[in-house]
Image: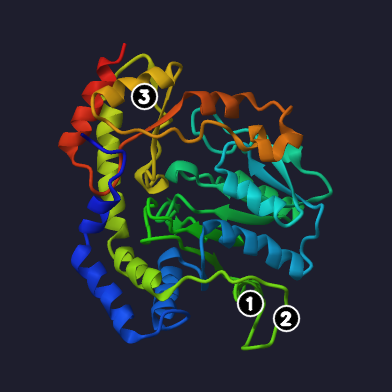
Amino acid sequence: MIPFLSLKDVTNLHSEEIHEAVSRVVNSGWYLQGEENKRFEENYAKYIGSDYCIGCANGLDALIWIFRAYIELGVMKPGDEVIVPANTYIATILSITENGLVPVFVEPRLNTLEIDDALIEQAITPRTKAICIVHLYGRLAYTPRIGELCKKYNLKLVEDNAQAHGCMFNGRKTGSLGDVAGHSFYPGKNLGALGDGGAVTTNNKELADTIRTLANYGSPKKYIFKYCGRNSRLDEIQAAVLDVKLKYLDKDNAHRKQIARYYYEHIQNPAITLPEQMTDESNVYHLFPVLCDRRDELQEHLKQQGIGTVIHYPLPPHKQECYSEWGKLSFPITEQIANRELSIPIGPSITLEEAAVVVEAINQFK
């Protein structure tokens, strides 16, 4: 049996240090907003290449606070538009609509699975205030053209970096390419906690201070409330665990890239389409998606061989019941990806021998 991703195996890679970190926090008697958070925020900001990092409860909250802070600072107001890829996990869209902003969907390119920068400019209107790019599957979504459009139209560039810790563009990490970025530390992510966790990175001090305040009940100091905020904080245990795993992130990502190279070199089945191979710098392989017209049959075939897979994502946001107002919109490339995508095993604990078994099973699919 080859699981899609064994979190137990991933944790075991650094088990001794993780247990030591958890015990240190438990024994300290200090469980929120302490030294562990301070240390992790400093180390993660340095890793990303940003001036500020604000830990929060999860990746969705990270994005919510970004847009909420821009509203509090007068940069945006409800009804303003945010350009966003049509193919993304729903959290990206939820963060926009949660703040009364309007998502404007743009199709991806089929060969990259990332937002098509050639389609963005035609989606810009006088109400557009930001472009939110999503480094989906761990693949770089940023392009110089996107940066130029943000300058030309005075738009904020927000990065959803939930799936791409350690990904780079020209030597700079995703999460530092735009004005601000949201990060998720959900356990299955490249940098995963032992529960929920998230963070925001930015070089803008005013934005960072506003986000930290919003996520702490709206309170800049105890019992003083500037905003109607919420409680969204990264706890000390998760911060300590993340700080351990951060030291090994580049090494773990290098292993993912080794497995991915093996897949690219050895998967040879005309029924299977692989996304365009990117440079090692540009992809940290949070997921390894393949496309197949008979996706469900492929998934069942692999299941019969004892190989775990996951579909990311079978129903795009505009087709979800909660967004029924957009249900009649047509995004054929996004819908094609949703109907054909299957993620095969990849991660820091899978072996090359296991990858060879996966490849053999895929190549046998008829």
> Is residue 116 at all visible to an observer of this figure?
no
Mark 3 / mark 1, whichever is N-terminal: 1
Query: In 3D space, how far apart are the residues under numbered discs 3 and 1 (Cα atoms)?
Result: 45 Å
Residue 208 lies in quadrant: bottom right
On residue 299, the disc is: 3
Would you name the residue on which mark 2 appears? 226
Q: Does the CB distance between marks 2 and 3 fall below 8 Å?
A: no
Q: Residues within 10 Å of mark 1 (few under 14, many from 20)?
A: many
Residue at 30% across / 26% down in the picture?
A: 303
Query: In 3D space, how far apart are the residues under numbered discs 2 and 1 (Cα atoms)?
Result: 8 Å
The answer to whether residue 204 is left or right of residue 33 is: right
Q: Does the CB distance between marks 2 and 1 fall below 8 Å?
A: yes
Q: Nearer the viewer, residue 57 or 133?
A: 57
Query: In 3D space, how far apart are the residues under numbered discs 2 and 3 (Cα atoms)?
Result: 51 Å
Q: Amino acid at mark 3?
A: Gln
Residue sitting at the far top: 366
Q: Which secondary structure, mark 3?
A: helix
Q: Amino acid at mark 2?
A: Lys
State which quarter of the image contains the C terminus.
Answer: top left
